[in-house]
Amino acid sequence: MRRGAQEWVGAWSAKRAALSPDRVGLVDAATGTEYTYAELDRRANRCARLLADHGVSLDGGDEETIGGDEETTGGDEGDDGAVTGRAGGRVAVVSRNRPEYVDLFFATGKTGGLLAPLSHRLAPPELAELLAAVDPELLVVEEPFADLVSEATAEDTGAGDCPILSLPVDGESTWKTYASALPEDGGEFDGPTVAPGDPHLFLHTGGSTGTPKETVVSHEAIVWNSVNTITAWGLRDDDVTPMVFPMFHTGGWNVLTVPLFHMGGQVVIDREFDPGQILGIVEDRSASVLVAVPAVLRMMVEHERWDGTDLSSLRFVKSGGGPCRQSVMEAWWDRGVDLSQGYGLTECGPNNFAMPDGWPREKAHTVGVANVHVDARVVDDDGVEVPQGDIGELQLRSPHAADRYWRAPAETAETFGDWVSTGDLARVDEQGYVSIEGRKKNLFVSGGENVYPAEVEDAVADHPVVADVVVVPVPDDQWGQVGKAVVELAPGAERAGDRADDPLPVDELREFLDGTLARFKHPRRIAFVDELPTSGPSKIDRDAVEAEFGE
């Protein structure tokens, strides 16, 4: 056995297959197909051979350097103090949750390549920007998103020069199919030795202006997040979960999927989930753990199947991606389910906190205390820890943290160091429970997705009736928060015929933004002002706008 290669992600499918070959690790609810760990390893070996043939391997990447315009994955120190090393070749995926995603996760681990899941919810220009950043050796696309990818690769960004394989739906395929490209050999794959710090996942997150960044997540970070989750949440080898997060999110991998694969548990995926279907899976498969965004948990409570569904198999449920309403938590508690809130981010974890045994309900507004291998502190603007009970920026330190953004040295320096700066405001009470108090940076979360007002404002301002605009978050029962566009109209717009009463209906604005912004970023409400307030020459007073219109 090769020591280096056997200790990290590339070894997991083979080791789990050896330990529990006949145990079902993955269920595809769309087809009803169950995959044992032995089958998952054979599939991963076939996929690894396909990836190696396309250069998605440790040997297929680029030489990178920390300290300049590019970055490293580990290696030797040069004369200038920079570190040089290899970045493995990359496979990008645009797809809903499918078994092929799991093949690619384990296979990139075996080859030393990187898996870069990309959101299928993005508009073509946004996806083109990410493809240009990732610069993949291979692109795998589920057929419903063929037009999206075709538009994105046609953008003048340098994206789209790599081979594309299709994941068909109902027999339709635009490109050669992934299945037809797979080699037949499912035997053990003889891959390279992978170091702990070598990257395995690129997971994208927004920048301060909405520009996507790829967070570089190493093999070691994935392992440590899994250990943190297992030890703090008490995961077991007989746990079953419906995975309701998309696999282009850290939630799709690192919240429960990878930790349960580590333990030998069972993960149920599907292309789309609705609340009734999740309730059905909980009952039919005796699901024991569930993590979802507050909107999903609320919709489950409101579903007609709620009262009649047997929830007794659930050991715990966690809410993540934004604050969960007290009424929703109480509805789960009334059914005897231990529901609490979690906290994480792509750059660190994401599983950083847990509720102590026997935690009191009056602490439900908190995210609990730090996990076993996580340090947390709250600091002021100078990086000095604030007194207990005071609000400051939450910083985290853990071996499961990422250490950089891909080829973004300035933003890397702002976020990463001895501690990860989360950009979130928090306070710690006298028992050590951490409460998240808001965002330090100007963003909000809608349905678990980060929305950056500056990006939305730039797009809305292109509408001919808009002179200027500020987007502020407002509460929403379904999504937690949505954007409200506070619009200063262009001269004459308010007198434009049948627009006199409503110069810019929401539906018209959303239609205007389609193809430019992902729909979760679209404002759902609009207010009009004669003139936006300013706090200085030509500088809009965002605080004043939010105070008046943010509800």
Image (tube, rainbow, N blue to C red):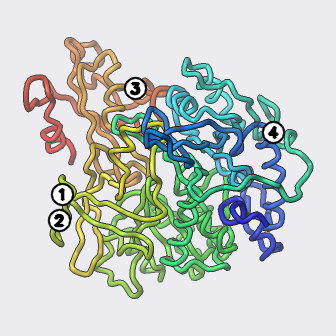
Name the residue rendered at 62%, 51% in the picture: 272
Q: Which of marks 4 and 3 is nearer the N terminus?
A: 4
Query: In which quadrant of the rendered view does residue 538 lie?
Result: top left
Horizontal side of residue 251 vs 525, given as left or right: right
Name the residue rendered at 36%, 38% in the picture: 410
Task: List x then y, in percent, for residue 523.
Answer: 35, 36
Disc on res. 386: 2
Separation of residues labelled 3 and 1 (CA atoms): 43 Å
Separation of residues labelled 4 and 2 (CA atoms): 53 Å
Quarter of the figure with the N terminus: bottom right
Horizontal side of residue 418 vs 120, given as left or right: left
User: Closer to the camera, 66 or 493?
Assistant: 66
Callout 3: few (<14), some (14-19), or many (20+) C-alpha neighbours within 10 Å? few
Check disc 1 and give the amino acid type. Asp
Task: List x then y, in percent, for residue 320.
Answer: 43, 62
Q: Can residue 478 be seen in this view?
A: yes
Picture layout, residue 428 above or below residue 244: below
The residue that disc 1 covers is 380
Horizontal side of residue 9 vs 354, given as left or right: right
Check disc 4 and give the amino acid type. Asp
Check disc 2 and give the amino acid type. Val
